Structures are given as C-alpha cells and as structure tokens.
Amino acid sequence: MTPEEFRRHGKQVVDWIADYLAGIETHPVLSQVKPGEIRQALPASPPERGEPFESVLSDLGRILLPGITHWQHPSFFAYFPSNASGPAILGDLLSSGLGVQGMLWVTSPACTELETVVVDWLAELIGLPERFRTDAAGGGVIQDSASSACLVALLAALHRASGGRVAAEGIDRRYTVYVTSQTHSSLEKAARIAGLGAAGVRVVDVDPRTLAMDPSHLRRLLAEDVAADAVPAMVCATVGTTSTTAVDPVPAIGQACREHGVWLHVDAAYAGVAAICPELRWLNDGVAEYADSYATNPHKWLLTTFDCGVLWTADRAPLVGALSILPEYLRNAATSSGSVVDYRDWQVPLGRRFRALKLWSVIRWYGAEGLREHIRKGVALAAELAEQVGTDPGFELHEQHPLGLVCFRPLWPGLDAAAADRATLRLMELLNASGSMYLTHTKIADRVVLRLAVGAAATERRHVEQAWAQIRWERQALAATLP
C-alpha cells in the first residue's frame, strides 16, 4: 500500500469509525450471533491474490459487525467501562503509524520520555505520593492491564522478600500472597505464573456487610504463616472490587504489612482514576503511607482506548532487579550510563508499543476539568439509579455504591432462595436478549444480584432511566408467569 493509497483508505476507515460511533445506538448492545456463525461466514482459506481494501470494509460491516458486542454503546452496563474516545483512537492511530518498538530508551527516546512524563502527570492528577514519580526513587510504567501489573508487582515483591534469591535460584521455600474472596482472579493467576501455586494464595476474610478485607484476620494469617516458616511476600488491597466496588481498608492493612515487612500492592484498576475528583480522593487513604505499588486502568473509566493500565512503584529497584536481563545484543551506551529508563525491565515482554501517545492525547484534549466531568457524570447517574432502586418495593439495593456501579436484587415473593436466584438470572437473560441493554450478575451472601455499571462516554441520564424502566417492566412481566 503506497502512502497515497493509505491516505485514501485511511480516510475511509476514519469515516467508517465516525459513522459507527454516531449510529451505535442502532445496534443491539449484546451480539446476537450464535457460536461459530462468524467463522462459518468467513472463507476457510486465505486469498491467493490481494483484495481491494473496500472489500475488507464491506466484510467488516456485513460479517463481523453483527458479532460485535458494543462496549461503547450508551446502554452497555455489563462490565466496568472500556472507554474509547476520539483523542484516544487518534493517539492509537499515531502509535500504529509510527510503528515504534520502545523496548529501550535508545530504540526511541521519545517513546520512553513521553511515558515518564505522562505517568507522572497522571500520578499528580489522582493525588499519588511524590515517591511514585519517575523522577524519584519509584516511578510508573504503562502495562497492558492490571493483570500484568499484579504479576509484575508480585515478582518485585518476591525479589525483595527473598533478597534476590528467587530471580537467581527460583522458589526455594514457601512464599505466600494474601487476597480476599473479592480480589480479582488475576492475583491467583499471578501466583500460579510466579510458581507459588494456588496453595500459596491465602484468602483473608471480609466484612460480611461491606465485603472489605478484615485486617484482624490478615494479621492472624500473617502470624500463622511466619510461625510455619513461610515468607509472606505480598498483600493485595483492592480499591473498588470488580464484583461490588468494595474498598479494602488500606491504612489498617498497610500497618499490618509494615509490621511484617510485607509488600503492599493496591489494585485500584477500576476506581483509582476517580481520585482525579477531589471529593473522591478518599480512595487514596493509606496509599501514601503504606503502598509499595499501585495500579489503575485509564482504559476503564478515563476515556483511553484499551489497552492502557498504569503501575507505579515506590522503589523501582526490586522491580528492575526481578526483571532485568541484558544480553549483548541489547547493550548500548545510554543503558550502560545508567542515566535512562529502559521500560523493558519494568514488564514481562521485551517489546512494547507506544501506548503513552493515546493517554497523552486524552489528557491534553480533555484536561483535568474534562476528565473530572466525565467521572462525576457516571457517579451522579449511578447515585440517582441507586436512590430509585432503594425506594422500589420490588427490589433490594446493595448499599455499597460510592462510584459508578449499582448492585441490586429483584424480589420474588413466594419463591425460595434457589428459585428466586433462577428468576433473577432469567430476568437478566431476557433483558440482555432484548438488545436494548447488557447487564451482568454477581453473588453477595450467596445470593444472585444484578450489576449495572455506568460509565460509557456516550451514556446520558435518558439511557439509565430507560434501562431502569425496562428492568422494572420485565420483572413485573416475569413475576406474573411464576408459580
């Protein structure tokens, strides 16, 4: 494809995306295709001769688009948002156009240095401590997701806990990681990848009302494991759990970690960016005093196209010590001088994309004021919905809703718990099959509840009101058919 052909087809692609976003409400939120339907519509073998790009766009609309679940739809309420805004899309396009592989500073200095600036900007915007800045002892790095951030943090924690022996000799004794039933599953996966196994993951009790970690139980587990000659390596405190947005008490957890010399990782994948609003800065309580690492995902609620998760550490030495390997073919004068950051030492893969461009584009386009407005809109809409649910006799509200997620349970008079849960799941299936919205569920106290997450860039009050009206109507209609 020549530059002129790229110019022509590139304009077609941008027009296609713009038309898609402008008309996104005409599509069913959840894809309606059956398993295998997309594959059957595509050729079994690749083309022998090249095809016009117009054919690619035609098949995109004809074959692939029906198989898309529309995450940017204003009635997508299923999972935490995966925002894609115009500036982020354009920043990603620029990254692809430049084709940078930023594994080392020398392979593109701008790729590295823009990233150091942008992660420091974001740290300032959400009120993280100075020691997390890249011009201090710690620093930040853009990962693909919070799952990778958890793994990298665990490797750094093991490096520190073992005095570097794990990197040199492998796992030679029992190391333990502490989570709750509400912690994201990526922590257990990280423990498996790191060689600790599921047996190395200790599950701390939660408060039955708030679903937040119980610090007193954490202390007992730490003491038991130390007495059993295990080495507590890391505790993960979650600020905004995936299931219900529960917030673990970071100050109390941090104090227990400090007493035992345990690495404290704070997983704020969803909620962390909300601290850009001063009234939500309480989300950072305890981070400045106790956190060794902290992660949040701009690609969830901060209008930045997936993938863009940021990990900060208060001390980069254990991180680099755990991950740095320098073969001869990567040696260069800048690296040897020690005066530059080589982000290949801050992540699992060697290669890395120029992700900072899209976050930079978003921050510059919206500014702090625009980003705060976006977060506040989601919080306000969720609060309005929670108030309506809480006053409706046909529903029970789960009170933990300080951010953009509302959890609630339809009430089914006359049904036992098992039958009521089946009815709730059936209600969700009917709502999702309608194409007008997409919800998910979780369990609280072993009962099925529905989750409605507000935060898509296009979501307005009317979309939430329409969803609530349909939920109420479908519940009433389903209740009339039940015994």
Image (cartoon, rainbow, N blue to C red):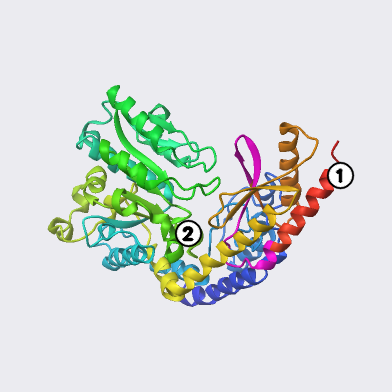
Q: Is residue 159 magenta?
A: no
- The percent position of residue 419, horizontal first and vertical second, equals 75, 33
**Residue nearest the viewer, comparing 432 with 61:** 432
Q: Which residue is mark 2?
A: 299
User: Total of numbered circles in the picture?
Assistant: 2
| Residue displayed at 49% across by 38% down | 207
Element type where label 1 sits in the image: loop
Name, please, the residue furthest toward the top.
228
**Residue nearest the viewer, comparing 476 with 146:** 476
State whether residue 195 is above or below residue 451: above
Q: Residues within 10 Å of mark 1 (few under 14, many from 20)?
A: few
What kind of residue is marked 1? Ala
- The range drawn in magenta is 441-464
Task: Locate residue 27 relative to residue 456 in the image: left or right.
Answer: right
| Residue displayed at 35% across by 51% down | 286
Q: Quadrant of residue 459?
A: bottom right
- The percent position of residue 359, horizontal first and vertical second, equals 41, 66
- The percent position of residue 209, horizontal first and vertical second, equals 54, 41
Q: Which residue is mark 1?
A: 480
